[in-house]
Amino acid sequence: MRKLIRTVLLVDLLRGLWVTLRNQHPKHIYTEQYPAQRPKVAERFRGAPRLNINPDTGETLCIGCNLCALACPENLIVVGTERDPKTNRKVLTTFTYDTSRCMFCGLCEDACPVDALELTQDFELASYTREGQIWDRQMLEEGPRPTQYKS
Ligand code: SF4
Ligand code: SF4
């Protein structure tokens, strides 16, 4: 009987409307001012990839071991290397990363033994073409450069 009275008098609807009205005060309204103010993402967020370089020498940290490519379930990383005839060491020649197929699982980053490959906190990965989604070594080494807007 009580339930019937509540239903007829629209008690639940009115209570819901009251909650809505109570929160109309400007102090309760929160609007993210993106892109003028960039939102802070979670500490462990995995976004745009970067191939780290040694800041002192400018040389890549990547040793061309191919472990990231082997760890990737999407097979979207291609590492190109050649042997240095003097040192007989592998030298990185090319590195491509297809961001359009990446699910940002972080397995490649975890597999890298020298912390050369890193998934950064940048989340703006849009491009106008599919080709634009394939990042080459230069783009990866420069890292993401998000456009800074002013309010
Ligand atoms: S984050 Fe995952 S899917 Fe993306 S490249 Fe790394 S291993 Fe592959
Ligand atoms: S795992 Fe690291 S060092 Fe090895 S090829 Fe990938 S980025 Fe380079």
Image: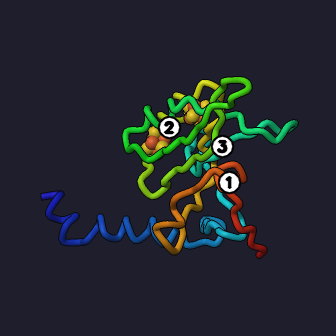
Task: Look at the numbered discs 3 and 1 and tell me whether their residues touch, using CB distance below 8 Å.
Answer: no
What amino acid type should be assigned to the residue bearing mark 2? Gly
In this rendering, the answer to whether 138 lies above or below 33 is above
- Say which of marks 3 and 1 sits in front: 1
CA distance for labels 2 and 3: 14 Å
- Residue at the spot 65% in from the left edge and 58% down from the top edge: 39
Q: Nearer the viewer, residue 138 or 38?
A: 138
Q: Is residue 53 shown left or right of residue 126?
A: right
Mark 2 CB lies closer than 8 A to ligand 1: yes
- Say which of marks 2 and 3 sits in front: 3
> Which badge, 2 or 1, comes first in the chain's sequence?
2
- The residue indicated by pointer 2 is 106
- The residue indicated by pointer 1 is 138
Percent across and percent down for residue 147 are: 71, 68
- The residue indicated by pointer 3 is 51
CA distance for labels 3 and 1: 9 Å
Mark 3 CB lies closer than 8 A to ligand 2: yes
What amino acid type should be assigned to the residue bearing mark 3? Leu
> Which badge, 2 or 3, comes first in the chain's sequence?
3
> Which badge, 3 or 1, comes first in the chain's sequence?
3
CA distance for labels 2 and 1: 21 Å
What amino acid type should be assigned to the residue bearing mark 1? Gln
